Image (cartoon, coloured by chain):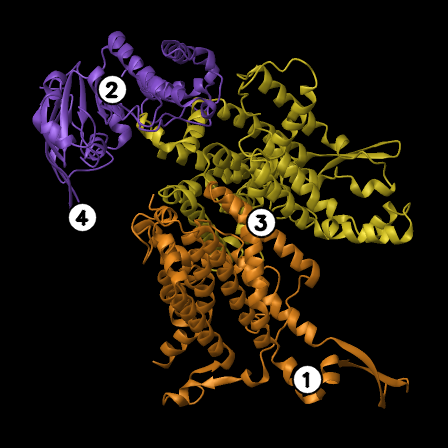
Chain colours: A yellow, B purple, C orange
Amino acid sequence: MLGLEKKDFRLLLIVIGLTMLAPFLLNPFPEGSEMAQFNAGYPDLMQRFVIFGIFAIGFNILFGLTGYLSFGHAAFLGAGSYGAVWMFKLLSMNVLPAIAISVVIAGLFSLLIGYISLRRSGIYFSILTLAFAQMSFALAYSVLTPITGGETGLQLALDDPRIFGVSQTATGNIPVPALFGLEMRSSFEWEVGAWLFTFNTGYYLAALFMILAFYMSIRIFRSPFGMMLRAIKSNQTRMSYTGLNAKPYTLAAFVISGMYAGLAGGLMASMDPLAGAERMQWTASGEVVLMTILGGAGTLIGPVLGAGMIKYFENIFSKINETILHGWFAFLPDGLENFVVAMIYPFIGKGWHLTLGIVFMLVVIFLPGGLVQGGQKIAALFKRSKPEDAKPNATEPAE
Amino acid sequence: MGLLEVKGINKRFGGLQALGDVNLSVAEGSLHAIIGPNGAGKSTLLNVLVGKLIPDSGSVSFDGQSVLGRKPHEINQMGISRVFQTPEIFSDLSVFENVMIPCFAKRDGAFRMHAIESIFAEKGIQAQADAILDDVNMLEKKDMLASSLSRGDKRRLEMAMCLVQDPKLLLLDEPTAGMARADTENTINLLKDIREKRGITMAIIEHDMNVVFSLAERITVLAQGTPLVEDTPDNIKGHPKVREAYLGEAQV
Amino acid sequence: MDQFILQILNGLDKGSAYALIALGLTLIFGTLGVVNFAHGALFMLGAFVAVTVSNILTLSHKVVDETRTDFLGNPLQVDVPYLYDWFGQTAGDAIIDWAVPISIIIAIPIMVAIGFIMERGLIKHFYKRPHADQILVTFGLAIVIQEIVKYFYGANPIPTPAPEAFVGSFDFGVAFGFDPNAIIYPYWRLVYFFFSIFIIGAVFAFLQFTTFGMVVRAGMADRETVGILGIDIDKRFTIMFGIAAAVAGLAGVMYAPINSPNYHMGMDFLVLSFVVVVVGGMGSLPGAVAAGFLLGILESFASMSAVIDILPGINQIIIYLVAIIILLTRPRGLMGRKGVMEE
């Protein structure tokens, strides 16, 4: 189906199902209930889930398949954002040209940086990408202010010379990004009993792009090209003595992942038409590294899960405060309650970064395949209880 | 005119003359062994042949074309495959994928952006890969991860990866180094088998006299970076110069 | 001319910090072959040792001061540091004032211990794993350390003053016969510079003149041979990790008065220190020191208004630019050994 093996097609269907039904799945708690604050089904966060999913899927093509650890991928996301905002300012408020240009700009930018950085491998490659990204950030922050808006970031203004469309709406406001009149911020709200589900245009557009990005990544994983990338990760010596030139393959992987980052940046700007230099900072690049590895580098679905998890933690988990904890453990005797809360509190709520860091370290140490591998191991444990485990060493393609 | 012609190669590392005026000619269809004691310059010579080292002077031509200054992947595309001392395989890939990759390299050249096509649709390549795995008796292991193979099987796999490209010249760098006796025997048989079935020209660099004398048709003895003699195995066996070079090295 | 000297001086204190952190980084890379992304966190921990020490020294109890009253007319409660009770007010004040220098003594054992724990507990298990894994796990560790510090000390910078005696500036202008006030330079930065020179000298002397150092240097050059000689090089490398941690920590302690410590100061310095190491040559100790000062001074020259007028923004990117050019033209760095990760 669609040029995919049965197993991959099933995975694609699952991803489509999950993203399409996300407004329901992420809002399991009724409105107004105490648990409602853990609902993640609001447009802003759902958009972030899929946009960072795209970013991580792209990063995985470089790191997961090819084994090149870039610490500068946020620069491409930032460049894509700037490109998109400029399209809004100069051309039209339609999101399609903005997204297209963001992919193109990020592609060209990554071609340039990749061409230079890939002359080195290993840690030197990592440091080169880091240096380039920090340089881009510093430039965007200072000298390039006419293009990037500097410290304040690039924003739309009331006097933007838009070729197609108006500079101001009839009411004197800045027009909003839209897809042929369908505004990105518009939502349809559906009340079912105590539940409220929000269907946001921007989210569904971004989700469509993520499904497309995910589909493309499956195709790449299962293509001869993808196999070559894994071969590069595995053994570059054998690669060249087999008559293959690793350089164009790695560069292609770098540019593809750069374009994914650009797409994410373009979508980000389409949801909220502004772009700031901090999107290019190396800590932002570090975040996508965390997402990809946490979920499972080199697996198909891992990066998406990782991105979802980190964004969920950042936005929802971080809301848990001491009062809520005391509420949860109120059933315990007072002294014990205070003790338990004191033990847990550093790790959740505002301390979620600490948990993230610890989980990330554990994954790097014990689970190189990330949470996906962890899931597979648990699944294998359950399977083993059945008698039929007579297929030793069968290498399953990474899922 | 041999398939591989090495003329007047010199290579110095600092003050050390690693190769001094090396001449060598590997005739098409022959199995040529290069032997010599440790430090004789065998590995340096091999690295020159595959483009990893550039000699200070001299020429290396393969099939009428100069090899010097070309990158390893270009030299492979000319038709030279190499087997390493410790097998170089794609450990994280399955056995089947390991042999598919050289098939792609042979068909599509050093780089092709086939990012959308599916591997599963490449029936021709799959058939080739299956055939070569069958040839080396590894078909039932095709789904195993290459890193989980035994040492002997890794060698076999590497050989298969080279053979599937149907090279004009196969270079072998001490293919039995560090192997147990049984594995060495297996490798010798494998090489004999390949010779019989395919008649591929081979140049083998070897330390182990057993292997050399049971396989080679011509032998070049290298000592201190210079070829001492070149002759048939029978003549080499009794050669006084060779005895001298190998004194204390091995019983000849 | 005075501008010239001023810029060199300005570059020295940042350069000193770069050099000290880079020295530890390259020491760890050269001995253990590990790329330590948590090294910046050690620098930050050092600064927070200074913060902690000054917090402890100012631990107080409430005393009712009968002579003063608050606005309601009640007797005023004032905080009195325990040190006043023990040593009297003058001596107590002096001790509190010298919190940062005192921290140095306390920081050494703490940082060495942290280094040992880090190496034995975590890094040891990553010697054989790819560099990417080393980067990732130490990156994770850096996040964890950062967050722990943030939990205890909050996210805001904590001012940690230098001793009273070093507040103020030294007028180089007068000393060198220029106009007064042409070149003024804070005393503490001068102290920082000399301190770092001292530490660097001590590390080099240790490596150069002790048998221990000799073995470590031999191990850096050729680990296997040293192993064959029957010397337990691993134990020595663990100790070197402790020393590298202490060097980074001391750099942090002394830096606290220059920049108020915050939990992410380590990350900020780490990126630049990596660049410094690469420019100096991975695994080269003199290279790291030279590159540290060189880049510090270069950065300060690039921030001169005369330069910025011609090349706007150059001060922001000069270090990265130099690093990129070096990496591409001379991958082993200024003083790196040939063949060290050239590919």
Three-letter code for the amino acid on which mark 2 is drawn? Val
Three-letter code for the amino acid on which mark 3 is drawn? Gly
Q: Which residue is mark 3?
A: C121
Q: Secondary structure at mark 4?
A: loop
Q: Secondary structure at mark 2?
A: helix
Tag 4 near tag 1, CB within 8 Å: no
**Is B202 placed above or below A274 here?**
above
Q: Which residue is mark 2?
A: B211
x%, y% of residue C336? Answer: 33, 55
Closer-to-camera residue (C316/C87): C87
Q: For the residues tagged 2 and 1, is the chain the same? A: no
Q: Secondary structure at mark 1?
A: helix
Three-letter code for the amino acid on which mark 1 is drawn? Gly
Q: For the residues tagged 3 and 1, is the chain the same? A: yes
Q: Which residue is mark 1?
A: C92
x%, y% of residue C106? Answer: 59, 70
Q: Which residue is mark 4?
A: B14
Tag 2 near tag 3, CB within 8 Å: no
Three-letter code for the amino acid on which mark 4 is drawn? Gly
How much space separates mark 2 and mark 4, taking CA atoms?
A: 33 Å
Residue C301 is marked as: none
